[in-house]
Image (tube, rainbow, N blue to C red):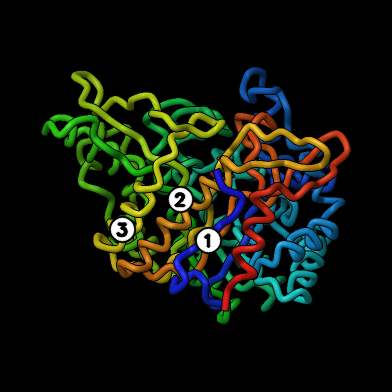
Amino acid sequence: MSSKLSLPQNSKMLKRDFTYGVATASFQIEGGVEQRLPCIWDTFCDTPNKILDASNGDIACDHFNLWQEDIELIDSLGVDAYRLSISWPRVITKDGELNKDGVDYYLAILNRLKNKNIKAFVTLYHWDLPQHLEDNGGWLNRDTAYQFKHYADLISQAFGDLVYAYATLNEPFCSAYLGYEAGIHAPGLVGQEYGKKAAHHLLLAHGLAMPVLKANSPNSQCGIVLNFTPCYPESASEADKAATSYADDYFNQWYIKPLFDKQYPNICQQLPAHCQPDIQAGDMEIIAHSIDFLGINFYTRAIYRHHDDKKFEELPARAPRTDIGWEIYPMAFYELLTSLNDLYTLPPVYITENGAAMADKITDSVVNDTDRIDYYQSHLNAVHNAIEDGVDIKGYFAWSLMDNFEWAEGYTKRFGIVYVDYKTQLRTVKASGLAYKHLISERT
Ligand code: GCO
């Protein structure tokens, strides 16, 4: 157990041009629901038994009101960059026009960040789809991709040159699979016939938005953020290896291969006809628009074995685990980064999320989360090693700036490097936050 974070003295991650940041997402921190349209997560939270503690995003971290203090907090950590997301239902009206108040809210944030010399990494879609678009079919409706393009167009014009980097989507796997196939995220649809259709329209939305963002904001870095849960076989048997490879194609490669290879993994042809994505002529060209950077989110790995009836079976997570039950296995991070670098011609990479939920205790205004520091240390080492082995990684963002609404887990899981008391909205920098700040300050 350590209270410090360190890297080898010659590490490229100890140079000033390596970007360090903290990340959040609109629905998870903002609250301020009266000032925006409803989104699918409002509806999902209102549905019984979907959220572990029956909570919602109505107040969350009250960042809608406390954003100025929160930017001071971000600044106090000494980070170079802040990754935030724009709430689509806050900035767009039902008629598809800009909502001036919502836009002004983000302009104030972006201007404040600029004044403080903190680069804004803006995600346009971190899962809060306006409910009226879901009522029209959501991501199962191809038109939603065009609605997204329209939103990306208007908002990038409004933001001018205040945005250092745009990510179109955050983790389309989660939106598509968790939201439209497994049903554990909003909108909560269940059925294999939905997942890949939703995924295709999400990726199409990304591809449609890319040239628009580049035209409106030529100086911004534009890309996408994908999450990966690397897949490992339980044994060296051919059957387990084949099952694992299938799972990897289904959950991971599905979202990256089209970006670089203009096609889905070969398992696409094995899917039953009613589960196929609706691919129209030219779609794969649109999706494969070049990107300036790839954002990679990593938390854990998964282990699979062959199953006679299903394509694969996922095994329970091994120890050691974080408080959310995810195995701590930093080697998978290194192997992920180097294997993606081997498989694809990657643009510069940012680690846009990495971090851990831990069972924090606050005593006398101190959170001594040495377990989280250990997690960060081992994963920063993995990034360092991947850079040494040739992966072009430009920066790293801790997930998350502060404890927040952890989706289906509600407020029961704490991912912050800053502790949030949800009764008083008091923020307390954890030991991990202090260690992160110290590491960042050590650069030359
Ligand atoms: C994610 C999400 C975050 C989660 C985090 C922990 O992109 O999955 O961006 O919203 O809170 O990953 O589950």
Query: Disc 2 residue type?
Result: Ser
Of the 4 image quadrants, the one containing the C terminus is bottom right
| Residue 349 in the image: above or below residue 185 | below
Q: Say whether residue 104 is left or right of residue 325.
A: right
Give the residue number, with chain letter if any, for mark 2.
378
Is residue 20 at all visible to an observer of this figure?
yes
Of the 4 image quadrants, the one containing the N terminus is top right
Q: Say whether residue 403 is left or right of residue 421.
A: left
Q: Can you tell me which quadrant of the image ligand 1 is in? A: top right
Q: Which residue is pictured at 33% across the width and 50% down the height? A: 279
The one nearer the camera, 148 or 439, is: 439
Classify residue 359 by image quadrant. Answer: top right
Rounded to the nearest whole Å, what is the CA distance between mark 1 and mark 3? 26 Å
Classify residue 163 by image quadrant. Answer: bottom right
Mark 2 or 1: in front is 1
Mark 3 or 2: in front is 2
Check disc 2 and report its element: helix, strand or loop.
helix
The one nearer the camera, 365 or 70, is: 365
* Image coords of residue 412 (percent x, y): 67, 29
Give the residue number, with chain letter if any, for mark 1.
6
The one nearer the camera, 199 or 439, is: 439
Mark 1 or 3: in front is 1
